[in-house]
């Protein structure tokens, strides 16, 4: 940790009084508006000064200090100009990056392959078979400026869900952020840990139970060291309308099936967790059981996607909280209700160490079809 004496020494070493004054003012603004400690800004100046001293060897000390300040100021001015608000909270779930145009491209190719004239006449493709954007308006009602234009090869989105508190406010709220193509899969999103982040409150708030946020262009979810019992979030009442017992999953799913962004939160005992991911999907299978299920019930299957494998540090016998979306799976006359996992938390006092993978277990042994 940088001491006040060290910071004072750095400031005294600045050879230009105007630069020194500007640096102190910049550091104060960053602390007040951005929550960035003054020491961080001043240490950034020191690091930049050392680097640029080797890059711009022909400059005198004052001129070099001015160039260093220009660089540091440029870094933080963009942050200061942004209207994005500061939030603290906990991310409870994050989806896999999803290609929004994959289905539309696939359907367009199928139509063109079977009936090229129909594909062109109805706007599925152009004459060469290039898939076109057929959506005239967005869900908000706003016109789609890309209507009739070629679809991109991919357009990724990633949904982030959690609880947050806006700086300066006392109320905790459920939030959702959709990371677009420039951020999806590129921004680390830690789950079940206290974080701070910046985001913009969306103009259109469709759900009174959920705060819709738009991502800040440089969004980061910075983990905080403060102690926080994650179970307080699940037991505090804010999420009650999303909680379900395992036995009630069929009814819960029927209620929310029409919502593509549906969320369910359950608790259960880990009956089984696969030692290896499924070869075709990359998911790991986990089966939950608890006292609410009948004795002959096979358990509730949960599919843990690849981007959450790192949080699976527990074994069978543990009690966990699972955040995800329900799905209905039919096989002949059987109907099962599964959970595609977006968030996972092993309750510390009921957490059993991860199972050892037995000798001889292979990928083939772990194959299950999602």
Image (tube, rainbow, N blue to C red):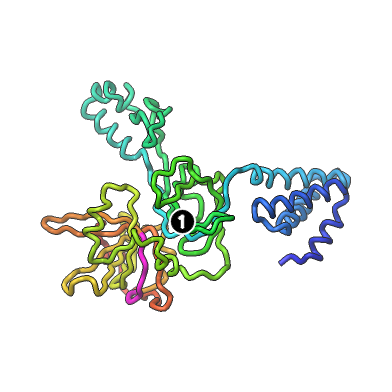
The residue drawn where x is 88% and y is 45% is 60
Q: Is there any visible trace of residue 39 in the rendered image?
A: yes
Q: Quadrant of residue 289?
A: bottom left
The residue drawn where x is 24% and y is 61% is 249
Give coordinates of residue 318: x percent, y percent: 35, 75
Q: What secondary structure is marked by label 1?
A: strand
Give coordinates of residue 263: x percent, y percent: 34, 55
* Image height of 81 relative to 187, above or below: above
Is residue 171 magenta-colored? no
Give coordinates of residue 2: x percent, y percent: 74, 65
Q: Is there any visible trace of residue 283 in the rendered image?
A: no
Q: Quadrant of residue 38?
A: bottom right
Q: In the displayed structure, does residue 8 sit left or right of residue 155?
A: right
Q: In the displayed structure, does residue 174 sit left or right of residue 291?
A: right
Determine the residue located farthest toward the left in the rendered image: 333
Find disc 1 in the rendering and name its residue.
173
The residue drawn where x is 32% and y is 36% is 104
Q: Quadrant of residue 157?
A: top left
* Image height of 354 relative to 369, above or below: below
Q: In the displayed structure, does residue 290 sit left or right of residue 172?
A: left
Specify the quadrant that holds the N terminus. bottom right
- Range of magenta residues: 316-323
Give coordinates of residue 336: x percent, y percent: 20, 59
């Amino acid at each position: 940790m940088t001491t006040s004496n060290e910071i004072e020494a750095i400031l005294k070493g600045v050879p230009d009084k105007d630069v020194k004054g500007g640096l102190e003012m910049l550091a104060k603004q960053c602390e007040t508006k951005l929550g960035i400690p003054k020491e961080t800004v001043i240490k950034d100046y020191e690091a930049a000064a050392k680097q640029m001293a080797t890059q711009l060897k022909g400059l005198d000390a004052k001129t070099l200090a001015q160039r260093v300040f220009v660089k540091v100021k440029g870094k933080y001015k963009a942050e200061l100009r942004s209207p994005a608000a500061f939030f603290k909270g906990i991310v409870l779930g994050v989806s896999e990056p999803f290609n929004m145009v994959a289905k539309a491209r696939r359907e367009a190719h199928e139509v063109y392959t079977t009936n090229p004239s129909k594909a062109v006449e109805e706007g599925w493709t152009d004459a060469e078979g290039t898939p076109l954007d057929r959506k005239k308006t967005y869900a908000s009602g706003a016109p789609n400026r890309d209507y009739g234009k070629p679809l991109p090869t991919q357009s990724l989105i990633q949904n982030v869900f959690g609880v947050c508190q806006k700086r300066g406010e006392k109320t905790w709220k459920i939030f959702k952020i959709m990371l677009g193509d420039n951020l999806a899969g590129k921004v680390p999103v830690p789950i079940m840990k206290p974080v701070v982040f910046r985001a913009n409150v969306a103009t259109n708030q469709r759900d009174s139970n959920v705060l819709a946020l738009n991502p800040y262009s440089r969004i980061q979810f910075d983990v905080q060291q403060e102690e926080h019992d994650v179970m307080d979030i699940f037991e505090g009442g804010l999420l009650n309308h999303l909680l379900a017992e395992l036995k009630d999953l069929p009814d819960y799913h029927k209620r929310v099936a029409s919502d593509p962004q549906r969320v369910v939160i359950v608790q259960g005992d880990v009956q089984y967790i696969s030692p290896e991911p499924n070869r075709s999907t990359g998911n790991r299978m986990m089966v939950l059981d608890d006292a609410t299920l009948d004795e002959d019930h096979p358990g509730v299957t949960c599919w843990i996607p690849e981007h959450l494998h790192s949080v699976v540090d527990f074994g069978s016998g543990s009690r966990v909280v699972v955040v995800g979306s329900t799905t209905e799976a039919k096989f002949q006359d059987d109907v099962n209700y599964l959970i595609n996992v977006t968030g996972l938390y092993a309750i510390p006092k009921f957490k059993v160490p991860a199972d050892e993978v037995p000798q001889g277990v292979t990928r083939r042994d772990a194959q299950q079809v999602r």
